[in-house]
Amino acid sequence: MSLVDSLIERMSLTEKLGQLTMTACGQAVTGPTIAGDSTEAIKSGAIGNLLNLVGAANVHDMQRLAVDESRLGIPLLIGYDVIHGHRTLFPIPLGEASLFDPEAWASSARESAKEAAADGLAMTFAPMLDVARDPRWGRGAEGPGEDPFVAACMAEAKVRGFQGGGLTHADCLASVAKHFCAYGGVTAGRDYAPVDISERTLHEVHLLPFAAAVAAGAAAIMPAFTDLNGVPMTANKVLLRDWLRGRLGFDGLIISDYNAIAELIRHGIAADLADAAALALKAGVDIDMMADAYRRGLPLALKRGTVSMAEIDESVRRVLILKERLGLFDDPYRRGKVRESAAALEKRRGLARHIATRSIVMLKNDGDALPLRRSVRRLALLGPLTDASAEMRGVWWGAAAPEGHVTVLQGLRTALPESQILQADGVAIDGADTGGLSAALRLCESADAIILCLGEAAVMSGEAASRAHLGLPGMQRQLAEAVFEQAQRASIPVIVILFSGRPLIVPWLVEKANAVLAAWFPGSEAGHALADVITGRQGPSGRTPVTWPRALGQVPIFFGERPSGRPFDSHDRFTSKYLDVANEPLFPFGFGLTYGRFELSNLRLSRAAIALGDVLTVQVDVINRGAREAQETLFLFTHDKIASVSRPKLELKGFGKIELRPGGSGTVTFSLGAAELRFLGMALEPVFEPGEIEILVGPCADRTQLQVASVQLVA
Ligand code: NOJ
């Protein structure tokens, strides 16, 4: 008999429910105070899994209680939100998405897993794969942006990075893909609000990244807090049991979100905790995070006959199997045994800087305001985010302390030791105080250039951080307008660095600034990364992974929209438009400037017609006509012109990069399988329809900037 079976045979109901329970230690919030009553519960086998406990010594102390002092000695599974780093922070996921570089995505996950595993952890509640098309929703910051293809690529890369060479390895974490699914569709961008979307959007957009995570071997899945068309995901049997387990064959763990099982009562589908617990278990949720609904509700559900012991055992088996796969039975202390070397930490910092540099998206650069000349004598560095170490972390800072993250001030002082850098906040990120404004303005007087660091606080995106106004918070606009006025009088260039967990809607700012960098939240190496781009030590190469609106009323706005029967026509009143704002975004998906100037030519396809099973090679020549070396990112889109179901105006199928010296040229090559040109037909089953497919390649999702060719699909 296997270890797992023999354990299940010997377990009491309390011990079984313990394995299905995950409880917080509170340490992440309150410091190293381990919740007193968990200690006894762990010893009695009533709690089998923990979250929010960090530090190898703490983890091992708790592990010892389970292994040495509980009757069956089953080790604990300890998870944490290692989202974009643990102690060393990489850019927030939306910032990382701007790299369009799966190898980079995998490498930061690999490094984060090593760092977290060295801290004793065995599981991360990541990656977050929610496709987000409404910037009001704060959680867009935690994920891959608006496009399902990007999200699927990120799913694969992140799972590979976190889980590394295999779960038994002491430097690997079990990856929990979340939040399954369509959480990004919350009504009006308000967090936790209901989700009501079509079956088609569900399958074409929101399920795709989860299929990729499962194919990559993700150890676990976390259902979203939200409902989907009336059925809360925590009790969504059709999607959890039938689609995820049945159709995709997912045999890993399903772990609820924080208190989500108990919340089934407030969703209005369960009368009490026993009811809620039964619904979740029957839907396939194995572990109850923080609701204590399984421990308190399942005994009654058993009595009522709404669940069976076999169903409980099935979930217990999955938990034990994961613990076994993580090597916890062989050596529960395998993670956190060896301290990482100083060299390993330094190397990680180097990677964090490299990735952060490449996550920066240059939205504007008029008159070559950037890169800054090294001879700049006096630089005025203004705004509430110039010297804000803690803010650089962005949402989900893992176990990273508030200090120690390089600020823009520190980064520029290091990069420009000869220059005089004068710094003032001027105003706070939020709030109405303008007391510091005039002192800040005085610094502009003798400056050769002004850098304005504006945007959101780290906590203004992420969970429970929806915003209905997407401008600059507090009095930052007042600061910016005053600076622009003064700078214009003295012809001083103004460079704006925007920090945010979403695209901020600030067309006035973009118009007035000479240069704008969208920095998202770059993480621990923020200041160095920004200094690298500002001084030209490294050129900007990030591309926005979300369409950047010009007005809030355009939201939701995304490039993958289907055509209208009345597309906008300026000569025809009855066409799809707003009376008061253009349809076009301020910046399309994929937009981002570089210090180069690229021209595309000669888009060519390896064949004129393809059948299912064929692979098409798509190539385009690129030349850098600019004066500086730079990296260009190109996107491959398709458009199915006539199909049984109206297809999106552009569908992303690939992205690629090329680095070219001034005057240098090269070729970017994409492979496109004909199978990727299937779509869901009227019955929502994949169909392959003969006909013409447009192949479009270019620097962003603006059709006017794309090279176009076409291929015939043949049966
Ligand atoms: C709630 C969040 O929705 C989820 O993303 C996170 O993993 C859990 N809390 C645990 O912190």
Image: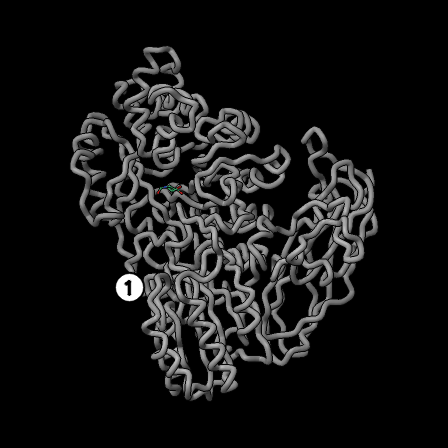
In front of the other: 172 or 575:
575
Q: Quadrant of ligand 1?
A: top left
**Which kind of residue does numbered mark 1 sit on?**
Glu
Location of residue 296 in the rendering, given as x and y in whole percent from the top left corner: 28, 22
Q: Say left or right for 415 vs 148.
A: left
The relative height of residue 690 versus residue 268 in the rendered view (above or below) is: below
**Rendered residue at 39%/45% (across/down):** 464
Way the structure is coloured: one colour
**Rendered residue at 35%/30% (across/down):** 288
Location of residue 509 in the rendering, given as x and y in whole percent from the top left corner: 52, 69
Q: Say left or right for 589 vs 649.
A: left
Residue 247 quadrant = top right
In front of the other: 81 or 469:
469
Q: Is residue 355 visible?
A: no
Location of residue 347 in the rendering, given as x and y in whole percent from the top left corner: 38, 64
Q: Say left or right for 368 vs 437.
A: right
The crowding category of the residue bearing disc 1, from other C-alpha atoms within 10 Å (few below 14, some 14 to 19, many at least 20), is some
Q: Secondary structure at mark 1?
A: loop
The relative height of residue 274 versus residue 188 in the rendered view (above or below) is: above
In front of the other: 172 or 279:
279
**Rendered residue at 41%/86% (across/down):** 445
Q: Tell me: is circle 1 under 8 Å from ligand 1.
A: no
Location of residue 343 in the rendering, given as x and y in whole percent from the top left corner: 33, 65
**Dividing the image into 4 quarters, which one contains the C terminus?**
top right
Residue 610 quadrant = top right
Q: Which residue lies under the disc numbered 1?
A: 403
Q: Say left or right for 464 vs 249.
A: left
The relative height of residue 703 versus residue 175 in the rendered view (above or below) is: below
The relative height of residue 192 versus residue 240 in the rendered view (above or below) is: below
